[in-house]
Amino acid sequence: MQFLLAFTVAGPLIGAVAALLPAPPGLKGKSPDQAVLRHGVTVTGVILVAALALALGFDHDQPSRMQATTDISWIPALDVRIHLGVDGISLPLLVLTALLTFLCALYSYFKPPAGPSPKGFVALLLVLESGTLATFAVLDLMLFFLAFETVLIPMYFLIARWGGEGRQPAAWKFILFTLLGSVVMLLGLLLVGLKAGTFDMVALATDNGRGLSASLQVIAVLAIVIGLAVKTPMWPLHSWLPDAHTAAPTVGSVLLAGVLLKMGTYGFVRIVLPVAPEGMHVFAPYLAAFAVAGIVYGSLACLALARPGAKGDLKRLIAYSSVGHMGFVLLGIASMTPTGVNGALFANIAHGLITGLLFFLVGAIKDRYGTADLDTLAGATGAALYGRAPRLGGLLAFGAVASLGLPGLAGFWGEMLAMFGAFQPAEGLSRPAFLTYTAVACFGTLLTAAYLLVVVRRVCMGAKPAADSPPLADVQGYEFAAWTPLAALTVLAGLWPAVLLGLTDPAVQQLLAGGKP
């Protein structure tokens, strides 16, 4: 188990180096470009198998215990250690990251993004995977920061070199926002580690802030939250996200929404809640207020983009929807209750599955029509996907209803539990304030349903196309292979939420209890 976790984290880095080396003559085949793309599929496939083996070997009777741990001294002067481990909180995120990266590599093999040599693309994809996996597996504050930062450079180049129109400004905006937030976060992490005398996240969580004064916790939480809020992203620090999603290639958008945004919310749960509970208690009402503002703002922005004549980009609309969905995650965390935090973790996974599928679908629509502009897609009578490409239209409608939180699908449980947590927040938090936040969040669910149904009506419905209309390709074999796991897991998580909640709940209970079982 120790080897499996270490290999899962470090394997993509080895694969990235190999991708940049000349391929052996027997593996080049007819096209060196296809060979390196095949290499990406192989490496990410092996990492996915390792992550699944880790999940199968995980002791599901003790999900609150750190398992597959490695603890090696790295910088003795600062007591920084190479400390790895997984519990019920991090395991689902590891598997989600490995799955989405593999599906992106598989999709790119058949539909390579337009841009420079695929060698650089595959290497960056693998470095991105390694940094994301490391973020969810490391148990040292300094290693967490290094892993947190590792993903920025590959994502910057994926947007700047393989993105679409406006890619350079979008890439610069992404890197500047996230780097500035990370600098502030580093100050908070250093403050906690130096004052507590350790950077070990398990020891800090067990201590539960008892070694840190209340004023120090408040300062540390403020600094750490700013960095995490940018990556989440939390309104009003979200403005880099729509531009980045709109300009990024399809697989870049899938990974950005599916796993990179989860790094911020994971930091809230793994670091802020257990390490500085008093500081979090001070900021929880404000965090909840920003969360519900993001829910309403994201939904209203999507409604504005969806209306006829707005020239709204479908990718941009899905990006703004992420601001709203991550607002529910932050609301659950701000409640500081097991119910709310479990809902936040569930919503994290659900958002990765559903929004990953939606970005795949929007990318496919853009490939077929040459644009993601809603007015152009809708035209006079609608794009009529139901009539021209029924499977593609059906999948888009499925993704939309899953995203709006239809009961029986994954999007329902996380948002519902987050609102339940806010309805009865932790002791000491203002219940009238959180009841107000819950009511606003409920209103946000109505707005979410409104804009997603408008999108389905405009894109999927319409008059039957004329007989001389050019044919529109329905779902291809490689698209079916890349999208089916996401759709199937969305249904499975919706019908059987205990699979995920059974992992997260014991770990969350122990985390909020200060590491005590």
Image: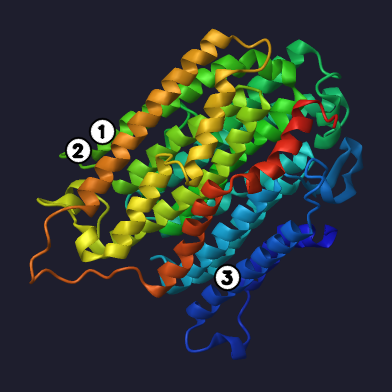
User: How far apart are labels 3 and 2 at the CA level?
Assistant: 39 Å
Q: Nearer the viewer, residue 278 or 199?
A: 278
Q: Which residue is mark 1?
A: 304
Please state, as top left, top right, bottom left or bottom right, where the N terminus lies in the image: bottom right
Q: Are marks 2 and 1 in contact (CB under 8 Å)?
A: yes
Q: Compare marks 3 and 2 and give the one earlier in the sequence.
A: 3
Question: Which class describes the residues within 10 Å of circle 1: few (<14), some (14-19), or many (20+)?
Answer: some
Residue 498 placement (x, y as % from top left): 64, 45
Above or below — where is 446 with respect to 216? Answer: below
At 26% from the left and 65% from the top, the residue drawn is 389
Which of the 4 quarters of the picture holds residue 22?
Answer: bottom right
Please state, as top left, top right, bottom left or bottom right, where the C terminus lies in the image: top right
Question: Which class describes the residues within 10 Å of circle 2: few (<14), some (14-19), or many (20+)?
Answer: few
Q: Which residue is mark 3?
A: 40
Q: Are marks 3 and 2 in contact (CB under 8 Å)?
A: no
Question: Which class describes the residues within 10 Å of circle 3: few (<14), some (14-19), or many (20+)?
Answer: many
Is 369 left or right of 352, judged from the image as shown?
A: left
Q: Which residue is mark 2?
A: 310
Q: Secondary structure at mark 3?
A: helix
Q: Secondary structure at mark 2?
A: loop
User: How far apart are labels 2 and 1 at the CA level?
Assistant: 7 Å
Would residue 355 be seen by someone viewing this image from the given angle? yes
**Of tags 1 and 3, which is closer to the observer?**
1
Q: Secondary structure at mark 1?
A: helix
Residue 321 placement (x, y as % from top left): 40, 38
Type of amino acid under label 2: Ala
Type of amino acid under label 3: Gly
